[in-house]
Amino acid sequence: MSLAESAMPFSDIRNLLKAMPGPDEEALAQVRARDAQLTKPAGSLGKLEEIVEWYASWSGKGAPKITRPLVAIFATAHGVAEKGVSAFPSAVNRQMVDNFAAGGAAINQICRVHDIGLKVFDLAVDLPTPSITKEDAMDEPNCAATMAYGMEALAGGIDLVCLGEMGIGNTTVAAAIYTALFGGEAEDWVGRGTGVDDEGLKRKAEAVREAVCRLQGEKDPLEILRRIGGREIAAMAGLIVAARLQRVPLIVDGFVATAAAAVVYAMDPEGLDHCLFAHVSAETAHPRALQMMEKTALLDFGMRLGEGSGGALAAGIVKAALETHSGMATFADAGVSEKSES
């Protein structure tokens, strides 16, 4: 029986978090030892050296190499879109899934350039969840099963995974999750999303207020996820947990993907240590969310597309960092004199 078919309850998911491994200190020591011998001044590659250490620590590979990177896009539909919170209709969900399949989306091009695999997971994209302003998005069995489905995205020997998503209305859902988890007013967390006008922004804030009000102060992260979240956010949260358990370093994309990370963070602040945050979204509340979790993003390109686009760009940098580390000659190999002793 697959994980998705087993429909594990929330208690099982909480137990998985308790079993998450820490960093591999031996692998970290190996990359540091090699780095000290490479033909460059110590620390001269800055963040690239840190990325190699991060990847080695969480993959457990002392000679780190990426052979099967993947952008996993989780696509679904949200009933809250009917509230006029997006500049685009829900029909775009299916149209974009077809566009991904045809190779016509931005993410297809970025993945092609960086030789990254792409897989789209259809989470009932033609069947919206109930509007979170009126009803719970999911019951516990469905939410847990969706998280388990996300865990299965690692099948096939994936050694670096990037979160991606597609779902008209999901910046509203993400804003509701942030509000419930971190507090503040709805206006603190809503942004333009797909490009809504001022009236649309007001509708988003009101939808977030209504959704969070229904929680009546609920603070359990998994309950918040199932009641005012979405299928793609649940699947991404599940994938974050599975990646840690299977020692697969993970890259978090933008505003919506970070909401899935926030759910895991709220359960265990150390639960995101194997994650690299790809970029700061142009969504105005994304820097606030990262600050709440004490995370720093790698890039700031003013992007707000979603679909794993920032994650794939970051993956290209990770691949370059590892190739630099493994391919550079050592001082001994190249016959280059090392730093003089003072």
Image (cartoon, helix red, strand yellow):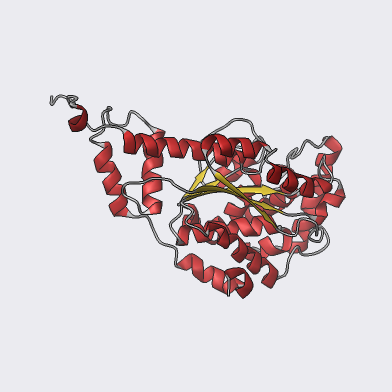
Q: In the image, residue 91 lies at what x, y percent?
A: 83, 48
30 vs 331: above or below: below
Q: What residue lies at 46% left-to-right and 67% top-to-bottom?
A: 18
Whether residue 148 is visible to the viewer of this picture, yes or no, is yes
Describe residue 263's horizontal placement relative to residue 30 as left or right.
right
Q: What residue lies at 75% left-to-right and 62% top-to-bottom?
A: 137
200 vs 208: above or below: above
Most extreme residue toward the left is: 342
Describe residue 39's horizontal placement relative to residue 168 as left or right.
left
Residue closer to the observer: 131 or 29: 29
Q: In the image, residue 184 lies at what x, y percent?
A: 68, 48
Q: In the image, residue 200 lies at what x, y percent?
A: 84, 40
Whether residue 279 is visible to the viewer of this picture, yes or no, is no
Quarter placement of the C terminus: top left
Residue closer to the observer: 172 or 120: 120
Q: Determine the image quadrant of residue 306.
A: top right
Q: In the image, residue 132 lies at what x, y percent?
A: 79, 58
Q: Determine the image quadrant of residue 86.
A: top right
112 vs 151: above or below: above
Describe residue 299's horizontal placement relative to residue 26 as left or right.
right
Numbered label tally = 0
252 vs 269: above or below: above
Describe residue 213's horizontal placement relative to residue 117 as left or right.
right
Quarter placement of the N terminus: bottom right
